[in-house]
Image: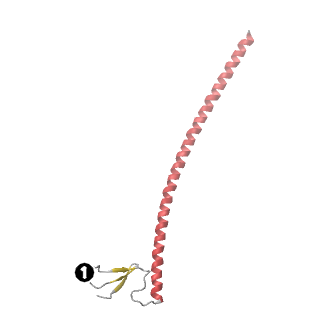
Amino acid sequence: MKGAAATVGQAFITAPSWEAGASLFAAVDDDTPNAAGSGTNESSQSTMLLKKRREMGEVEEQLAKLQAETMVKMAQCDERERILVKNQKKESDHVERCHKYIDENDRKRERAEMKVRGLYENR
């Protein structure tokens, strides 16, 4: 089995000689030179393609994570906006009630002043 090689996923796998306690397969990183030493342009291009696909997958994972975080933040903002609108409505209602109360008191005061003036004019 010495010298056997295979490509699995995105890593180049070689089978080392049988040693006590040694792993059956040793992974060789894509950045290391080809174990066979062929150095052909075709294997270099396929290696680059695998590397770029892996990078693209990592970028897509980061993008998906960022999109998920953005969706959570947008949901939080929507909730805060909903609460803000609710509080503004409560404040607006309160101000309207206060204005009604003030207007009613002004009318009562004016009527009382007119009665007082009428009393003094009749004397």
Q: Quadrant of residue 37?
A: bottom left
Q: Amino acid at mark 1?
A: Ala
Other-residue count near label 1 (Cα within 10 Å), few / some / many at <14 / 14–19 / ≥20? few
Q: Secondary structure at mark 1?
A: loop
Nearest the eye: 52 or 32: 32
Q: Which residue is found at the position 47% from the left and 81% from the top?
A: 49
Q: How is the image coloured?
A: secondary structure
Nearest the eye: 20 or 55: 20
As displayed, is residue 35 above or below residue 101? below
Q: In which quadrant will I find the N terminus? A: bottom left
Q: Which residue is found at the position 57% from the left and 35% from the top?
A: 94
Q: Which residue is found at the position 55% from the left and 45% from the top?
A: 84
Nearest the eye: 77 or 118: 77
Q: In which quadrant will I find the C terminus? A: top right
The spot of residue 78 in percent (x, y) is 52, 52
Name, please, the residue furthest toward the left. 20
The spot of residue 109 in percent (x, y) is 66, 22
As displayed, is residue 115 above or below residue 74? above
Name, please, the residue furthest toward the front. 20
Tag 1 residue = 20
The spot of residue 51 in percent (x, y) is 46, 78
93 displayed left or right of 31: right
As displayed, is residue 73 above or below residue 45? above
Q: Which residue is found at the position 48% from the left and 89% from the top?
A: 41
Number of dots carrying numbers? 1
Nearest the eye: 101 or 77: 77
As displayed, is residue 95 above or below residue 42? above
